[in-house]
Image (spheres, grey):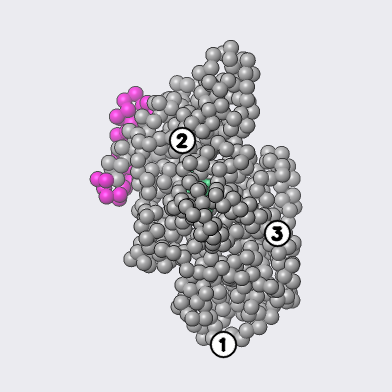
Amino acid sequence: MQLQLLPTSHTFFTRFSLSSFIHRNPNMTSGSNSLMWFRKGLRIHDNPALEYAAKNSNHVYPVFVIDPHYMKPDPNSFSPGSNLAGLNRIRFLLESLVDLDSGLKKLGSRLLVLYGEPSDVVIRCLKEWDIKRLCFEYDTEPYYQALDTKVKNYALENGIEVFSPVTHTLFNPVEIIEKNGGKPPLSYQSFLKLAGEPHWSISSPPSTIPPIGDLGNLEVSEVPTVEQLGYQDFQEEYPDPPLFKGGESEALRRLKESTNNKEWVATFEKPKGDPSAFIKPATTMLSPYLKFGCLSTRYFYQCIKEVQQEVKNHTSPPVSLIGQLLWRDFFYTVGFGTPNFDRMRGNTICKQIPWNGDDELLAAWRDARTGFPWIDAIMVQLRKWGWIHHLARHSVACFLTRGDLFVHWEKGRDVFERLLIDSDWAINNGNWLWLSCSSFFYQYNRIYSPISFGKKYDPTGAYIRHFLPVLKDMPKEYIYEPWKAPLSVQTKAKCIIGKDYPKPVICHDDAIKECKRKLAAAYELNKKTNGVVSDEDMKKLRRKLVEDQGQGNDSRRLKQKLI
Ligand code: FAD
């Protein structure tokens, strides 16, 4: 059977112009079986892949594959969850699937849940159900690129049409990179210039979905509960009920709530937000819904645009709400066009820096035991809520890397990747590169103080008292630096530093000096070698840094000084 690869701008698909991956089979009759493969994009609204499947088929099989590798409890991980994902995110995903299932049921269908390695399972489905059309949202993450190549190759070889539109982002990263001569733009401003205005229209939700055909011999289940996956014992560590209920219905409800406040949307200025606001956080908190595509970014964008048209004056990118969505697209584009974007070695846009691999310091940071209440409170919020404010992310990422502990950004990235509900490959890596001064941003002299930064927003320490109740009675004079409180004050506050709450793992003033010294030397080496730093160069730099510091005044020594 002959297959035709259509240019993405083919007239038939002008509504998805230049934003689709389409392999059409010209001999295909409409009315055959389609498989709608959900991965992200867990929604009915603005879902061109679903709309296409529903319009052109006799039977539609809506499928989600649970990869046990992603979901199975891992008792050896540092927090409840699987090997790859914390329990907060697993629970959010399952709730999103339940909501999707109920949305599909309203349209005459339902979600078919299967277990196994996703590409193997999908290929089995294609065979067993005699599928002629495979529809799924295009994904730029390396994991999905590899998965999708395998499935697309099978489909192509077997005359199956593939419809895979780019709908997770506002722009198609491929197009932006092409416009920029094959390289991703490395600054937000150049990205904005290349991107211009998006040119899609929102896809209308299908009014009905063709029925599911014969299921043959494949084992199909309902969406499991967290308990059914084996997570009975872990509930108490998390807020109950969870702060983020997964699913499209909740996403649309929250979006409406946010955009109803037109003044707030129009005057939104990200840097002015208060990272310590926890009763009513300063931003939309929609990131988990965008991550899983419970909320269409395009629909979100359109709603903000509508508000802006109604309100006379509004803020602009990079600080506006639209600006935030564009940051998302920026990191998706750079991530897609940069080999080894998620690591330091082999990543041409990443400065080569001799970070340490101090697992003791890493664990203190991860487990909220640094002795700096601002940092520890944020890390508790991260673990409990699976979400923290952007500037809180700045604070702890800077502290772990270039500000204080000089631990490798990849290690911090891994902790975020596990604990965040909104954990997103492109955005998380992009921001860790940024915060560690490895890429995009290079002013390593500008440090977030673990003491004064939080105090600026929250002088009485309400945020710290909430997330670190052990410090709840510490007077406000000492809440950011409790080790300075006289013993009598500590006793009265029922919190002895070094016993009830840790002493600081480093001396901040010494640590910043050390970090700056190392970064200056690393930047110099990167400049000298034009960014091509060999293993040998790196070894030499490490040796030089030890020699220069004479007595070995590194973070480990600082740590010993204080404990
Ligand atoms: P809002 O301010 O309401 O913004 C709306 C949306 O815009 C967000 O939901 C998000 O999709 C996007 N957005 C906002 N800020 C950024 C940004 N700086 N870069 C890219 N997109 C942005 N965001 C993630 O979604 N997933 C991550 O894994 C992630 N990791 C991060 C790691 C670090 C070290 C830092 C500093 C930031 C990270 N961010 C990440 C970006 C940002 O902090 C979150 O997107 C934001 O705090 C989510 O809250 P919100 O939905 O209320 O954001």
Distance CA(mark 3)–CA(mark 2)? 38 Å
Residue 412: tell me if it is visible.
Answer: no
Magenta-span inclusion, residue 549: yes
> Which residue is found at the position 68% from the left and 41% from the top?
238
> Which mark is nearer the camera, 3 or 2?
3
Reply yes or no: does residue 440 show up in magenta. no
Depth check, front residue: 158 or 26: 26
Residue 472 falls in which quadrant of the image?
Answer: top right
Mark 3 nearby-residue class (10 Å; few <14, some 14–19, many ≥20):
many
Tell me which segment is drawn in magenta: 527-554
Residue 90, image x, y percentages: 65, 51
Instruction: Please name the amino acid that badge 1 sits on.
Output: Asn
SS state under label 1: loop
Residue 399: assigned label: 2
Q: What residue would you read off at disc 1?
A: 27
Residue 329 vertical placement versus 271 (above, below): below
Q: Residue at x 63, y 75 (%)?
A: 53
